[in-house]
Image (spheres, rainbow, N blue to C red):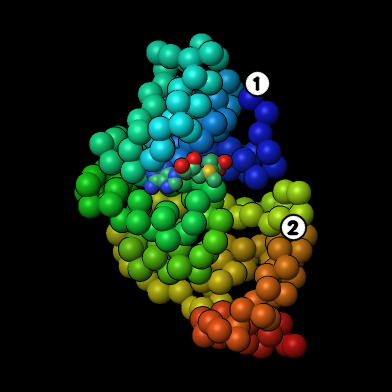
Amino acid sequence: MQELTVRLEMVYKQVRSAVSEPGSARVIDVGSDHGYLALRCLDTSLVSSAVCTEIHKAPAKRSETALILAGYKERSEVFVTDGLNGVPLMEGDIVVIAGMGGLNIIDIVTRALKDNGSEVMKKVTFVLQPQKSNDAVRKFLAETGFTYQDESVCCDRDIFYNCMRVTYKGDSYSLTDEEACYGPVLLERYNEGDKEVIAYFAHLDEIFEIRQRSNHVVKSALEARKKNEGK
Ligand SMILES: C[S@@+](CC[C@H](N)C(=O)[O-])C[C@H]1O[C@@H](n2cnc3c(N)ncnc32)[C@H](O)[C@@H]1O
């Protein structure tokens, strides 16, 4: 079975939670690189098939070769394309966009919504793991009308990562700066005493303390956090 890093294991667990009936859904891994996530999903019979997309030819070839060598030629497709271009979404799909910048993720999801329309989008689950710009991603998701199924965090080789599982509903709402920077689901987990989230927030507080000097959203989020924490 395909081994995963702690970060990708977290992403895989969000995919697993999105699957209602094992072996029925299709996973689409946007920016698949080595194809590890698709391989794990197929190895565990979590999905019926996997689609990998890659903007660059070399990683696309890596994904394709790995999937063929593992015996999944018939159950997988690899496309050299930008985001989800040329890959029409279907009901029940689970789209993963992991290990990319938040602005890139926003761009890919915006185009997917335009290309597929809101009715199809409502039947697809998105698993998003931004490497940065979480506040922008969360504000975009709220304004566009995505709701949270879950958000998780992990620490992989001393680096914290988070992963959101969201679905499109089409009803726009707004987030406070605190919710955008810390995550509405993670704020709830923090208040419930989740140890991993407490450690993650301590890390965020440290980096936000510096970033607030040049970023008014972070400044306002940090101030709200301190007020809510009674600091
Ligand atoms: C850092 S890797 C992450 C790989 C894997 N998703 C993971 O989480 O480990 C990012 C990959 O996304 C690809 N990529 C970046 N932008 C893309 C886009 N717009 N469409 C498809 N692939 C993209 C890159 O070529 C690279 O292989």
Callout 2: SS: helix
Tell me residue 33's x, y (percent): 51, 35
Which residue is drawn at the image coordinates 60% and 55% (left, top)?
Answer: 162
Q: Nearer the viewer, mark 1 or mark 2?
A: 1
How far, Cα to Cα, is label 1 from label 2? 27 Å
Tell me residue 62's x, y (percent): 50, 26
The quadrant of the rendering that contains the C terminus is bottom right
| Residue underneath mark 2 | 196
The crowd level at tag 2 (other Cα within 10 Å; few <14, some 14-19, many 20+) is some
In terms of image quadrants, where is residue 54?
A: top left
In terms of image quadrants, where is residue 191?
A: bottom right
Q: Within 8 Å: ligand 1 and the Cβ of disc 2?
A: no
Q: Using residue 77 as the reference point, say whether residue 151 is left or right of it.
A: right
| Residue underneath mark 1 | 1
Give the residue type that dot 2 points to: Glu
In the rendered view, tell whether residue 215 sits above or below residue 135.
Answer: below
The quadrant of the rendering that contains the N terminus is top right
Tell me residue 71's x, y (percent): 51, 11
Q: Using residue 101 as the reference point, say whether residue 161 is left or right of it.
A: right
Give the residue type that dot 1 points to: Met
| Contact, mark 1 vs mark 2 (Cβ under 8 Å) | no
